[in-house]
Image (cartoon, helix red, strand yellow):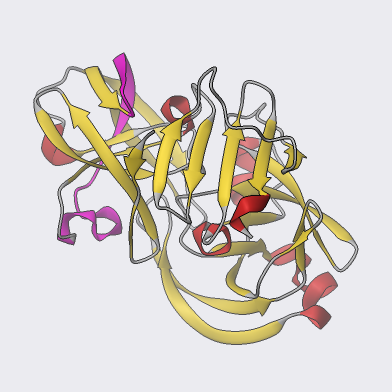
Amino acid sequence: MGETLVINNDRLFAPVGLRQISGYAHIDTGARHSSILQAHSARFPPIGTREVHGALRTISVPQICVDEIHFLDESFRDVVVDVQPDSQGDLDTLPFEVTMALGCDMLLQKPLYLDFVEGEIAFLGNNMLNTMENVRLETNFNLGIPILPVSFHNHVLDAVFDTGGGLSLLNQRLLGMLQTGLTEDEPIEVEDATGAKHTIPTFRCKDLVIGECLLEEFQFLVIDLSAIEQAKHLQIDFVFGLNAMKGKRWIVNRQESFIELMRTAS
């Protein structure tokens, strides 16, 4: 039905075609905009710049227009994308060629199926899977990225559904309120969307509920997201990352404003 998902070091990839080049794209539902690695950008016309807000800093990035991109049996034409350094996220060190990162501007043009059981990604059309028995979560796409409710110790959090985040993330302002239900873990070094690196505290959570489903224990970072919230004019309580999605099947449907967790993955 679709293409094979590749997970490498808690990052998600799938095949993509860029003009005459075949490679892989980083799949990132936490990004509104798609981007191309600098090594592949020179053949396309520049059109300006835009600001990118990461958790640790803000930078200005160049943009180009790509005449044609092939992904999941679809062709996308005249796509405006950011240009990112080849070394960002160590994408240039992987055992396969990564040409770009796909954000919500491309990924969510049709309902997106993410199967972490069979390792498959697809666009769903009129033959959409029967989802009557699945957990449907009303999701807000107004700001270009999927934001859904998750529950932790009777607190409802606004969470970004972010396949580009290897680890989940809690906004630091909520740590005091939730800390009694958390287990502190070892700090780790992370890199945000701008390439900035920092050592960040981590915790473990075993009581997070999505819909009516209690998730297995997983690790998450604690970062101050106030700068991103102010820049984007939105509230981000939690980032639901790849490590919390694994072992399940998901449908992300921007057209009907929901995300579904498929019961068959439990």
Residue 187, given in percent of the width and then of the height, sits at: 51, 82
Quadrant in which residue 195 is drawn:
bottom left
Quadrant in which residue 178 is drawn:
bottom right
From the viewer's perspective, is 216 left or right of 24? right
Examine the rendering and report whether any part of residue 64 can be seen: no
Q: Which residue is pictured at 49% across the width and 21% down the height?
A: 109
* Residue 205, above or below 138: below
From the viewer's perspective, is 6 left or right of 172? left
Q: 258 and 47: which one is in front? A: 258
From the viewer's perspective, is 39 left or right of 56? left
Q: Which residue is pictured at 81% across the width and 55% down the height?
A: 212
Instruction: Name the quarter where the C terminus is drawn.
Output: bottom right
Residue 88, given in percent of the width and then of the height, sits at: 27, 54
Q: Give the residues drawn in magenta, as a range.
A: 72-93
Q: Which residue is pictured at 53% across the width and 22% down the height?
A: 127
Instruction: Name the quarter where the N terminus is drawn.
Output: top left
Q: Which residue is pictured at 77% across the width and 72% down the height?
A: 207
Residue 170, given in percent of the width and then of the height, sits at: 66, 63
Residue 153, given in percent of the width and then of the height, sits at: 86, 69
Residue 78 lies in the magenta stretch: yes
Q: 52 and 14: which one is in front? A: 14
From the viewer's perspective, is 107 left or right of 70? right
